[in-house]
Amino acid sequence: MNKNSYLRKIPGCLSLWVLAATLGHTQSTASGTLLVSMSVQSSISVTFVNVSGAGNQGTCSITGANTNTASVNFGIASLSGDNQSCVSFSQNGSSYTLSNNIYTVVTQSNLTSSNFTLTASLGSSPTTGVVWSINSATLGTGSTSITTGGNYGANTSMYLQVTVQHTVASGNLSEVINLTATAN
Amino acid sequence: MSMHSIGKHRELILLALAAVVIAPLRAQSHPTSAGSLSVQLQNGSGLQMVLYSDPSGVTLGNSGTSSASLGFGTVAAYGTLSSNVSRTNGSGNFTVSTPFDVNVQVSGVSSANYTLTASLSSAAPTGVTLQIDTVTLTTSSQSIQTNGSYGNNVSHTFSAVVSTAGSGSGGPTTGTQLTSTVNFVATAN
């Protein structure tokens, strides 16, 4: 083997070592990919809130504030009065009426809507002689319009009343009132 | 028989005897042949990243590989979300989140831990900000973790901050599939 043949081989060996060293260095990283997908949907929400002064007469505090499932206790009532001081009471001899302000906040997301319509319905037919109303609109098991141009994000007051005739037997008159907010 | 023929006969007998004696001796010499094999092996350094579903997270597509998918399903500020997707409502936006796991294995590297970076292949959809562990992702590399532990499923939280604005008002397009590809790189420290 002559001198030139050695010279021809040495660069080849060097290049292999350099390549190996380079590969060894670049493999000190690892990669991964994550394909993320979602579909955004418009939505609207109605929540019950306690406003400042809740607990005072005319505005009972609710439980379940800031959720869409709340409750308010109107207590035990008769023609002689109501045992809940926060409930406004009136009677005309043949019936009594309990009144209270309930507040809701309606918010929207990913909508191009300037206001909303709020409707209400009773969960079940009321006992005969009992009338439920919001903002003077009598409620039934069918949908009743409460607000047609409600402002998003603002407290919306509902004046909830129940009138009970003196002929109604004593017992539980609890009702579920369902609200539905619809973007206009 | 002449004396000459007797001599020839004796030579043949001696040769035969010599063959009988020598042949076993040759057989007992056990001839061998040596050889050697030179084996070259260089243990290269290497890291491998695998993405896994987190027990508390959305089930990834192709979990257990380095190329997985995460589907949030339909998301909204209000209403029901897919299983293992959580939501927080903020002012002007809502955030949906889910954990996922990253597992980085190492070989041939003298490294105590690794740095994890992430970037988006393209800009996030309009009205959507993508985050990992509250680090906002962009098309540039962002550091997610600087001391990742090898060989363990390290949980990270993927979040999408979605504007509540309507489409065309800075909010995301609704009712269509929005996708983004997140590229991860783990580098040995």
Image (cartoon, helix red, strand yellow):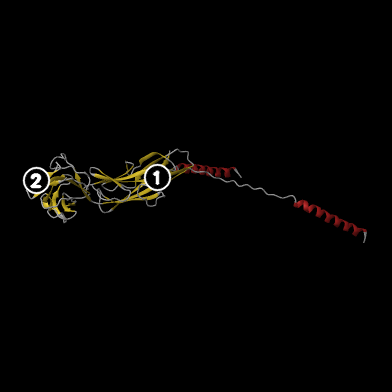
- Residue picked out by circle 1: B102
Relative depth, front residue between A159 and B27: A159
- Residue picked out by circle 2: A90
Residues under numbered marks 2 and 1 in contact, where contact means CB atoms less than 8 Å apart: no
Q: Along the horizontal axis of the image, is B71 left or right of A74? A: right
Helix, strand or loop under label 1: strand
Residue neighbourhood size for the residue with mark 1, other residues' Cα within 10 Å, grouped as few (<14), some (14–19), many (≥20):
many
**Residue sitting at the far left:** A92
Q: Type of residue at label 2? A: Ser
Q: Position of residue B60 (x, y in %)?
A: 37, 50
Q: Position of residue B45 (x, y in %)?
A: 48, 42
Quadrant including the N terminus of chain A: top right
Q: Along the horizontal axis of the image, is A115 left or right of A13? A: left
Helix, strand or loop under label 2: strand
Relative depth, front residue between B61 and A176: A176
Q: Type of residue at label 1? A: Val
At horizontal 93% and vertical 58% (from top left) the residue drawn is: B3
